[in-house]
Amino acid sequence: MLQVLSSAWALLLGVGLLMIGNGLQGSLLGVRGSLEGFTPFALSMVMSAFFLGFLGGSRLAPVMIGRVGHVRVFAALGSLISAVMIVYPALANPYVWFIGRVIIGFCYSGVYVVAESWLNDAADNENRGKALSLYMVVMTLGMVGAQALLLVGDPSSYLPFVIASIAVSVSFAPILLSISPTPMFETAKPMSLRDLMKASPLGCVGMFLLGGVFSGQVGMSAVFGANVGLSLVQISAFVSSFYVGAIILQFPIGWLSDRMDRRFVIVCTAAVAAVAGFVGMVEPEYYPMLLVAGFVLGGLTTPLYSLLIAHSNDFLSHEDMPAASGGLVFINGLGAVAGPMITGWLMSDRMFGPAGYFLFMGVLFAAIALYAAYRATQRPTVDLETTGPMAVMAPTSTAVAAEWAQEYVIETELEEQETAQEA
């Protein structure tokens, strides 16, 4: 781990600052939009716009990098992010915010691709898994730190938005001044959705539903908090609870997934998350319950993302894993676009009010658990000795990180095979 830090600390620092800017602007818009009188549905459209832009960026960023290179893409997209964050408070209009979120989502997708490419290039076969885990931890800690900065300054003023813009601008320095050479860039062409669905129905359906869960969860958490009358401090802690849970529960669930049938772990994980969602729905204004529900839901969403990719790998050859991972990330992105919109609709006064926030997550998690249980009856259990490890992944990752994770899985499997042959 120290070796990874010494060789890639600048990249990790830059990624952490990028995540602070991203997490802060998302929560700020939820709070500021409520202060401006935006309806939950209007804010849900604004939140969905980020994932729409992110999905588009994931397809176009590799083309842009191929034409002008990593450094120019990173600098150009990062500058746009900083500029849009200043536009938000200047033009408090849902239509302007929608366009701004599309732009920021597109740009963040591109800068993540660049950062992940550099970090993957800095890792080697011996520390690739540790580098991936450290990258995911830094991303999550950045989101947690962003919620603390939410308390600095009045959300109705310019200051918090300026802080978010500064965090992104400063992130350029450690990354662009890093001595790391520009890496070779090449991504696998995603597997066709038909072939991917045939190889892993549970992986495809689960990733689509989980995309809706994650985007609705993080995109609308601050909006939910403002709608139930939470203070700024309480909103900050509530949003943070999702990310703290993700950090704490990721590795225990990963340990279990490598030692038992992954479909069983998926069923149990999704079922527990569904219960947490329905419990949160019953008492949406009871603050201690909100923190517990947020911790459990956030703590199970991120591991479930990794579980679904690992489960899909169990039915794929090494040659198909990189292409399949790109396809699964794309499917997850499709689900993510709709998540905030449906959540906002359910949160409207004519539907379920604030309780709709937890209802949406509870229903989708229940659907994942039921479908995983059904799929367990349709395909025999994979021998644990032939399965690869579960690589730590986050729903905010791009296809580059997904392929990076597959490299780690393949290398680990080959090493285990060589060790078994020697024994």
Image (tube, rainbow, N blue to C red):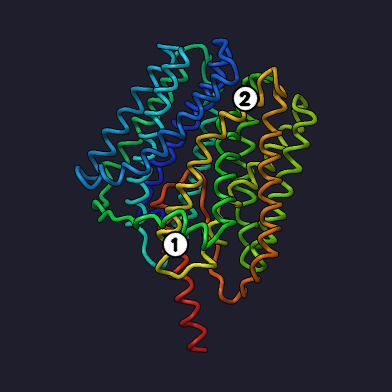
Q: Can residue 217 be seen in this view?
A: yes
Q: Residue at x 54, y 21 (%)?
A: 43
As drawn, 218 above or below 285? below
Question: Under tag 1, what secondary structure?
Answer: helix
Q: 313 left or right of 370?
A: left
Question: Which callout, 1 or 2, points at the residue further toward the start of the chain?
Answer: 2
Question: Under tag 2, what secondary structure?
Answer: helix
Which sits in the foreground, 195 or 279?
195
Label 2 crowding class (10 Å Cα cut-off): few <14, some 14-19, many 20+? many
Label 1 crowding class (10 Å Cα cut-off): few <14, some 14-19, many 20+? many
Q: Do the residues labelled 1 and 2 touch (CB within 8 Å)?
A: no
Residue at the outermost front position: 194
Which residue, given by chain and number where applicable, does mark 2 sit on? 345
The CA span between labels 1 and 2 is 37 Å
Which residue, given by chain and number where applicable, does mark 1 sit on? 406
Q: 260 left or right of 161?
A: right
Q: Which amino acid does label 2 sit on?
A: Trp
Q: Quadrant of residue 22?
A: top left
Q: 193 left or right of 390?
A: left
Residue at the outermost left position: 68
Q: Is residue 127 visible?
A: no
Q: Which residue is drawn at 46% across and 12% down?
A: 92
Q: Residue at x 38, y 18 (%)?
A: 86
As drawn, 343 above or below 367? above
Which sits in the foreground, 48 or 390?
48
* Residue 401, position as x, y percentages in the image: 42, 52
